[in-house]
Image (cartoon, rainbow, N blue to C red):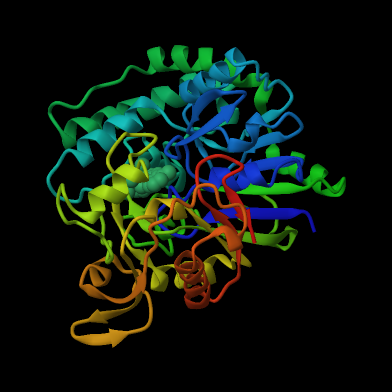
Amino acid sequence: MPGTCVVGLQWGDEAKGKIVDLLGDGFDLVVRYNGGANAGHTVVVNGKSFKLSLLPTGVIRPNVTSVIGNGVVVYPPRFIEEMESLAKGGIDLAGKLFVSDHAHVIFPYHMEEERVLESGTEGKIGTTGRGIGPCYQDKVGRRFAIRVGELLRPEHLRERLKFIVPHKNKVLAALSSSAKAFDADQLAAEYGAYADRLRPFVRDTALYLHDALKSNKRFIFEAAQGSLLDVDHGTFPFVTSSSSLPSGIWGGTGVPAKFVHRIIGVVKAYTSRVGQGPFPTELDDGPDGLGERIRKIGREYGTVTGRPRRVGWLDAVAVRHTAALSGADEITIMLLDVLSGLPELKICTGYELDGERIGYFPSDAYLLERVKPVYETVPGWSEDITKARSLSDLPAAARQYIDRVAELVGLKVSVVSVGPDREQTIMV
Ligand code: IMP
């Protein structure tokens, strides 16, 4: 059985990239199945750091082929920019990176629509502003969507844009008198030029992956965002527009679920969230509070937008729920070192909804915003744990914390991360 999925069990930014990196050379292909350039990660190769948001983290591995599946939405300038920055750093992706001809394309009118909708006072989702939602809306609506394969046929592309752009301009003008208007010929020329750069990378990746399955290649499926941002099972409507749970793999790549044999659920030792939406364990306690301290130590600022992330205690109710939804076989606990120096820690073990104790996670955002977390308080530790390399190097309180999280989630812990470097890892 060839497939491993690495999936975040909170609201994203759980340090999934580090887990993909730790899986090392034990795989041949890394495949993204959802999202777009809204998933920021920084990868370091030979002391040089690269900021990626669209290409999978696996692109930096010399013997790995990276695939952007049909479930991803692609913004071509970003694709080219990331590819070029890697090329400048000595990483040549020719023959090592493929993008699905079925993936949908993000145009500037998608971003403009998002900008207009997000600048209103109501209905704000707190998106990354990368045009993700409007592009997926067009995909599902069908009429006004363009796929990567269509970019490669200049006349066809021009015709499609001639039909789509006037409609977009009408909608934009109706939404806001200050919205930008777009020109179909100009966009056709611009995207035609991108297409020339993209052409060598484009193929029917489902067919490519089926061939890879036949030759027993080993896969990593890299989820973007976290399970609580999944469009079906997350805290709707404050979610992203794709299936970030492993359920997105089949639809987003064409690889059937039966080929995914291991699902690694990545969990931050606390919780973070960017954008709007309920967050029961949020530490919203001002500039001198614990929340700000964790944000600073954990460097909790968005990679894509630079926004400060909201932070709070670990929510075991939420993680137990997403572990079940994702089919996780194990969990990894990330950024444990960020909690060092706190006299005591809290773990959310239940909720109260309208005065009654509930043991489940209400993923309906409007219910979730009414719950009050029920906490268990556990002792903290004062020691620096960044040099710990085995569980026995950790203070007893840190070990207790790990054990308690494992018990509450109901899964074994396979990795504990105590710092950003590859070496700062405890394999359990
Ligand atoms: P969108 O994906 O840009 O539409 O944003 C929808 C929601 O998902 C917003 O709350 C974003 O902040 C959040 N989001 C999108 N991508 C990420 C990510 O990679 N990490 C954390 N949050 C994200």
**Which residue is at the far right?**
215
The residue lying at 67 percent from left, 50 percent from top is 254
The x, y position of residue 126, in whole percent, is: 26, 45
Q: Is residue 246 visible?
A: no
Query: Quarter of the image containing the C terminus?
Result: bottom right
Where does residue 289 sit, x and y in percent of width and height? 19, 53
Q: Is residue 334 left or right of residue 422?
A: left
In the picture, the quarter occupied by the N terminus is bottom right
Q: Residue at x 53, y 60 (%)?
A: 394
21 relative to 368 in the view: left or right:
right
Count of numbered tags: 0
Residue drawn at (78%, 46%) of the image: 210
Write the residue at 38% across / 29% down: 164
Coordinates of residue 104 in the picture (x, y in percent): 51, 36
Compared with 10, 98 (above or below) is above
Asked if residue 354 is positioned above or below residue 216 in the image, the reply reads: below
Say which of 98 and 2 sits in front.
Answer: 2
Q: Position of residue 128 (x, y in %)?
A: 33, 39
The picture quadrant where one finds residue 319 is bottom left
Residue 138 figure quarter: top left
Q: Residue furthest bottom?
A: 356
Asked if residue 318 lies left or right of residue 95, the reply is left
Residue 415 in sight: yes
Q: Is residue 319 left or right of residue 288?
A: right
